[in-house]
Image: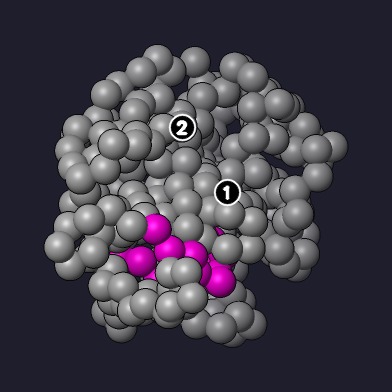
């Protein structure tokens, strides 16, 4: 079975690409979904995949920088919102590309090209000079990604509990769940009682502010505090169920995020 990794700092776009790939290429298994270039490299080293879909502009480590380290080890497809990079990728035919928002017809062309290369057992030749040039253009034209050393994870959430506005310590949050343009926060009061609150912010905007060492997605609409996990029961096709320490409800882990809980 052909395996692939998707790296994109926008969770909804990442999930949408995974969904479209399942339609365009049912036999393809998305084994990893990463939030940035560093996470993508770590996941690839732990379990290499044959294909990597890399968003060009990601915080910490861009898709271009990640591609340099993956060169010759897998087939690379750039995912970009910037047409100028797509045009250059097509010109060199060294790396394939898809432009956001991803269109099914264009993705089908990419899938066909990848299948041909896999059948021919041919790895595209990616010139180092071309990648260096692309990296320089990215740095010059786009805002610099946030440095990991300057990243300060969110510590408090201001949320509505009935008619009251509460200031919730992020450590007391068990999980967060998307509810349209709002996010439901399942948290514990100071005396340990389970409670819920609502914040007027989409989950995708909160994700970028959470400490990735403490919080992990179980599903495209759910994020769990790893400190609140009591156990993980593995299911079929890399799915799982998360059981919490202080709450009766369980959280379903979709196949796209199964790798995060595989070692737990």
> Neighbour class for label 2 at 10 Å: few (<14), some, many (≥20)?
some
Q: Can residue 48 be seen in this view?
A: no
- Secondary structure under tag 1 reads helix
- Disc 1 packing (10 Å; few <14; some 14–19; many ≥20): many
Q: Residue at x 64, y 42 (%)?
A: 17
What is the x, y in percent for residue 126? 55, 49
- Circle number at residue 222: none
* Residues rendered magenta in the picture: 196-211
Q: Earlier in the sequence, mark 2 or mark 1?
A: 1
Q: Name the residue under label 1.
A: 14
- Residue 210 included in the magenta stretch of the image: yes
| Left or right: 232 as drawn, with respect to 18 | left
- Picture coordinates of residue 50, whole percent (x, y): 47, 30
State which quadrant residue 142 falls in.
bottom right
Instruction: Identify the image quadrant of the C terminus.
Output: top left
Q: Name the residue under label 2.
A: 254
């Amino acid at each position: 079975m052909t395996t692939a990794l998707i790296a994109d700092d926008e969770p909804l776009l990442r999930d949408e690409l995974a969904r479209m790939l399942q339609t365009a290429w049912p036999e393809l298994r998305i084994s990893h979904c990463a939030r940035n270039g560093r996470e993508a490299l770590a996941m690839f080293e732990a379990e290499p995949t044959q294909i990597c879909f890399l968003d060009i502009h990601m915080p910490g480590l861009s898709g271009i920088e990640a591609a340099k380290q993956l060169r010759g080890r897998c087939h690379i497809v750039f995912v970009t919102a910037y047409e100028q990079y797509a045009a250059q990728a097509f010109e060199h035919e060294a790396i394939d590309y898809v432009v956001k928002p991803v269109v099914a017809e264009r993705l089908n062309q990419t899938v066909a090209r990848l299948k041909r290369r896999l059948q021919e057992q041919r790895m595209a030749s990616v010139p180092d000079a071309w990648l260096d040039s692309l990296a320089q253009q990215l740095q010059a034209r786009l805002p610099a990604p946030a440095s990991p050393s300057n990243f300060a994870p969110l510590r408090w959430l201001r949320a509505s509990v009935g008619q009251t506005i509460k200031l919730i310590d992020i450590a007391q949050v068990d999980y967060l769940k998307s509810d349209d343009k709002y996010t439901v926060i399942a948290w514990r009061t100071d005396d340990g009682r389970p409670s819920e609150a609502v914040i007027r912010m989409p989950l995708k905007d909160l994700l970028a502010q959470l400490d990735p060492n403490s919080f992990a997605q179980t599903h495209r609409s759910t994020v769990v505090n790893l400190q609140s996990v009591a156990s993980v029961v593995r299911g079929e096709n890399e799915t799982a169920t998360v059981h919490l320490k202080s709450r009766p409800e369980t959280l379903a882990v979709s196949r796209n995020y199964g790798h995060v809980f595989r070692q737990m």
